[in-house]
Image: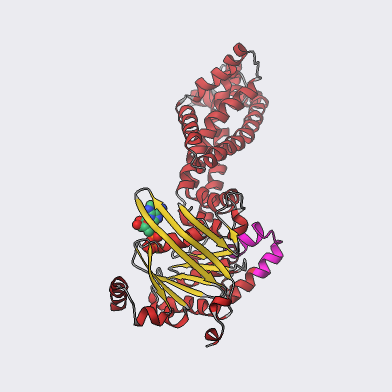
Amino acid sequence: MLISIVNPNDRPVVLDAKGIVKTFGQVKALNGVDLAVTRQELVFVIGPSGSGKSTLLRCCNRLEEPTAGAVYVDGIDILNRGININAVRRHIGMVFQSFNLYPHMTALGNVTLALRRVLKLSTRDANSRGMEALDGVGLTDKAGAYPGELSGGQQQRVAIARALSLEPKIMLFDEPTSALDPELVGSVLEVMRRMRNTGMTMVVVSHEMRFAREAADRVIFMDEGHIVEEGTPSDIFEAPQHQRTRTFLSAVTQK
Amino acid sequence: MEQLVQNFFNIEVLIKVYPMLLKGVWMTLQLCVVVVPIGFLGGLLVAIGYSFHNRWLNALLIVYVDFFRAFPPLVLLIFVFYGTPYVGLEVPAFVAVLIAFFLNTSSYYGEILRAGIESIGRGQWEAARSTGIGRLQTMFYVILPQAMRNVAPDLTSNTLEVIKFTALASVVALPELLRMGRIAQGITYNPTPLIAVALIYLAMLWPLVRFLSRLERRMLVKQR
Ligand SMILES: Nc1ncnc2c1ncn2[C@@H]1O[C@H](COP(=O)(O)OP(=O)(O)O)[C@@H](O)[C@H]1O
Ligand SMILES: [Mg+2]
């Protein structure tokens, strides 16, 4: 309810991607996509498999190098060659479908690696900050557990804590619940909901339409490397303008 | 039976030659503690070189690795020791052995580590890089520990192989264990020293084998 009081347009833009083109050989994964995200906004990205959602996110922290276009994070041109990309990336948290926890490190070790190596915190400071981050996702009791000893939902929450502990300006989620058993999805969405309520800026690629309805400020529908349409959740879910959107939505809500 | 003991397990002979054998053991140990680490480090550099996916660097490394893996280490050693004086470099036997072993060992370790590194999925790189960890730190803290675990059996057998190969150093008259054993055999006209040499190798390698396989197992348990 609070959200409607503040006009999102008054807020500073955290992420501004303009005219992103990305080709892989012959494949055009992105065909000129614009994505601007304002502070504390939660943007939901939906679309069929292969439509370029992951590529779009990965262009935003340069895990993929865009073929053309510009990406600004907090006003900084991150595609600039002279830039220290590592200094930029610590401000952009990313959560992956497959968690990608370091299997040879404990949950706490996973969270503290970047704190120690990037922020150069002492082991003690890193550990206390790491424990705070694990507390934020409800996993302090699993600090000493290895990823192999955790459920998928717990692993994903550790991965979220790993990104959050760096206090990023924006968090990118690439299908964070797609690899989870249905009964574990809720715990991860709960953490995301809490992040949203504490004002984190988020871009979420996901098929959790109910979560989108309830938490998103804006929903973007992508197909074939384009943004087909975007709007509020009710715009997109109740009154989609394009046939492709309708087809996609009816296909995913069938399930 | 008595004949057999006389020839192969002759205590008197052993008492006479054991100082020589000890000298040999000492030299072999010195060789191992230098050859194995520098070979491993060389291999690490090779493997890290591959991970840059630079076309020219890769081509160079492939040539290096293929060549020195295919080249018989004995011949390589002879080349280095007897060949270098012709180009104006007189290297001591120990150094010749180090050079030859470095070339051979680093290419084997390099190939093993490369395979290990390539066995680690892209997701691990991306997770670390996305938090701002640099390429080399990702390599050392995230990729290599997992890679080495995945190829631990190969690393182990290569290390044992290298240690046994140090016996080749006897061809350039380096007084390591095998050479001392053969000298002792020549002096005493009795093959007992050679048996002793074999047993000493066994006594050195067997605990190492046990230790390494324990280490392997421990690493596996920890991960899952
Ligand atoms: N590393 C890559 N190499 C080649 N093609 C890729 C690569 N990554 C993605 N693609 C292609 O780009 C298109 C968009 O992929 P992606 O962004 O993963 O879509 P989505 O996340 O929406 O499923 C697909 O056709 C995919 O095959
Ligand atoms: Mg995807």
Residues A94 and B73: in front is A94
- In the rendered view, tell whether residue B151 sits above or below residue B92: below
Ligand 1 occupies quarter: bottom left
x and y percentages locating residue A99 in the rendered image: 48, 64
Residues A71 and A111: in front is A71
Residue A88 visible at all: yes
Q: What is the chief secondary structure element of the magenta stretch?
A: helix
x and y percentages locating residue A188 in the rendered image: 48, 75
Q: What stretch is highlighted in magenta?
A: A110-129
- Residue at figure coordinates x 64%, y 24% from the top left: B95
- In the rendered view, tell whether residue A206 sits above or below residue B127: below
- Residue at figure coordinates x 45%, y 79% from the top left: A186
Q: Which residue lies furthest to the top in this view?
A: B86
- In the rendered view, tell whether residue A201 sits above or below residue B168: below
Where on the picture, by quarter, is residue A50? bottom left
Q: Does the segment drawn in magenta span residue A121? A: yes
Residue B11 visible at all: no
Residues B200 and B4: in front is B200
Q: How many marks?
A: 0
